[in-house]
Image (cartoon, rainbow, N blue to C red):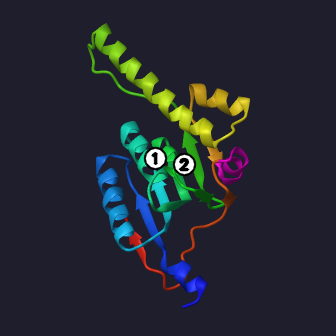
Amino acid sequence: MSEEQATQRKAAYFTLSGDVNSDMVHRVFEATSMMTEDGIETAHVLVQSNGGYVSDGLCLYNFMANSPVDFVMYNGGAVASIAVILFLAGKRRYASETARFMIHKSHATASPGSRPDALNIIVEGLRADDSRTESILRKHMELTTEQWGIHQYGDLHLNARDAKAAGLVNDVADFAPPRGAPLRNI
């Protein structure tokens, strides 16, 4: 067996789509367990998600970034909100020319008639979530002052070229598993 064949056997191709929630966390845990049992060293993952729960996205980021499997992430359409954080767990990251990213601060809706102490708890939680996600963004990306300003008060949209300039992706490239390679959905 050639070295190239040995390398190909240790890589696998996956798709991961949907809301970032406890179900996605469970699916990624299960899939990674199977990868390690199968001797997969590199997992190429096409991500398609408009976001979800901050705590689940942070869990996936920490798990995937420290997994024995090297994740290579791809954005073929949209990776938004907390899904950007899990995307950043990739050792290498790519985006199709037509892909987009969207980053924003945390938000929540208070119940009608909420008391001030309940509102304070919500605000404290949002600030804590923003602090955790922003530290990950700053670790991996270099946004311009103008981009950080947009992020401060609204949704920051980045196309593939903007994402490359900011360091969010290594290059503009498509998810393209080799012909005949198994493709599994997580």
Q: Would residue 57 appear left or right of 90 to someone viewing this image? A: left
Nearer the observer, 169 or 104: 169
Instruction: State whether residue 128 is above or below residue 59.
Output: above
For disc 2, the marked residue is: 88
Locate the C terminus and report the quarter of the image it occupies.
bottom left
- What predominant SS class does the magenta segment belong to? helix
Q: Residue at x 41, y 73 (%)?
A: 39
Q: Would residue 84 appear left or right of 114 to someone viewing this image? A: right
Q: Earlier in the sequence, mark 1 or mark 2?
A: 1
Mark 2: give few (<14), some (14-19) or many (20+) Cα within 10 Å.
many
At which x and y percent is residue 56?
A: 36, 43
Picture quadrant of residue 1? bottom right
Marks 1 and 2 in Cβ contact (< 8 Å): yes
Nearer the observer, 163 or 153: 163
The answer to whether residue 127 shows anywhere in this view is yes
At which x and y percent is residue 110?
A: 32, 21
- Asked if residue 39 lies in the magenta stretch, the reply is no
Q: Which mark is residue 61?
A: 1
Q: Residue at x 61, y 58 (%)?
A: 95
